[in-house]
Image (cartoon, coloured by chain):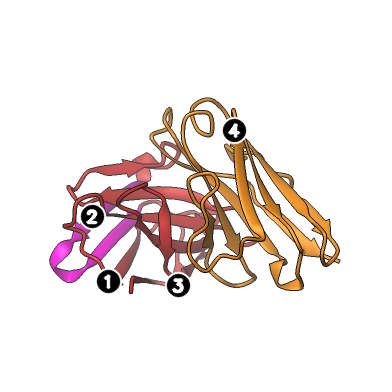
Chain colours: A red, B orange
Amino acid sequence: QITLRESGPTLVKPTQTLTLTCTFSGFSLSTSGVGVGWIRQPPGKALEWLALIYWDDDKRYSPFLKSRLAITKDTSKNQVVLTMTNMDPVDTATYYCAHRNPVYGYFDYWGQGTLVTVSS
Amino acid sequence: QSVLTQPPSASGTPGQRVTISCSGSSSNIGSNSVYWYQQLPGTAPKLLIYRNNQRPSGVPDRFSGSKSGTSASLAISGLRSEDEADYYCAAWDDSLSGWVFGGGTKLTVL
């Protein structure tokens, strides 16, 4: 059974760096084709894809946020970490991590999400 | 402004059939599969349709997906009150080298 859980601060100040951790079980990030992605959703707004890391450490970022994002993995801990620099109130959102289906590439399992508020 | 375009709202009465559209371009829907997610209030998105028209196990056959050119549609037949949710389409975009989502459609069951 695949499960994912996001963790990190619920409140960050403007200009600070956000660090979120996705801890997962039921799969290994060393298995060919597997990946973990991050998607966010501002309150009352649409989903927005942020980043994706593959089993072979290849990485993809949203071109709109690429300069502010970094995604890394720790296969031994079953964790993926997303950092976002220079946080702004518009970055207030629920942040989800999700499992990438190794065959077709879509996100098939999602974490419950964590709400991050950016405010001074 | 989302890359994929969906109507912001849709509605129907119990038992009716409703469709939700998703419009994209040649770099996303035109060249890749479309996926649909259902998001109930206060919960994470749940995969509803994959590879344009495939249902994961456990998704009722009342839900169906289709794709033509640079557009896709989600159809829900025999509408039920528990179908009231937000629905999002998604696709890989070759130009952006990333995933793109629609703006979401809020379905109301009257």
Q: Amino acid at mark 3?
A: Thr
Q: SS class of the residue under badge 1?
A: loop
**Left or right: residue B27 compared with residue B41:** left
Vertical arrangement, residue A1 with respect to residue B98, above or below: below
The disc placed on residue B24 is: 4
Residue that appears at 30% across and 52% down: A102
Residue B61 magenta-highlighted: no
Q: Are marks 3 and 2 on the same chain?
A: yes
The span picked out in magenta is A69-84
The disc placed on residue A72 is: 2
Mark 3 or 1: the one toward you: 1
Disc 3 to disc 2: CB gap under 8 Å: no
Q: SS class of the residue under badge 2?
A: strand
Q: Position of residue B19 (x, y in %)?
A: 74, 49
Q: Are marks 1 and 4 on the same chain?
A: no
Kindly identify which residue carries mark 1.
Answer: A26
Mark 3 or 4: the one toward you: 4
Q: Nearer the viewer, residue A80 or B10?
A: B10
User: What chain is tagged by disc 4?
Assistant: B
Residue that appears at 71% across and 48% down: B20
Q: What crowding class fits label 1: few (fewer than 14 Cα within 10 Å), some (14-19), or many (20 or more)?
A: few
The disc placed on residue A10 is: 3
Q: What crowding class fits label 4: few (fewer than 14 Cα within 10 Å), some (14-19), or many (20 or more)?
A: many
**C-alpha separation, residue under disc 3 versus residue under disc 4:** 34 Å
Mark 3 or mark 2, earlier in chain: 3
**C-alpha separation, residue under disc 1 versus residue under disc 4:** 34 Å
**C-alpha separation, residue under disc 2 versus residue under disc 1:** 19 Å
**Main secondary-structure element of the magenta-colored stretch:** strand
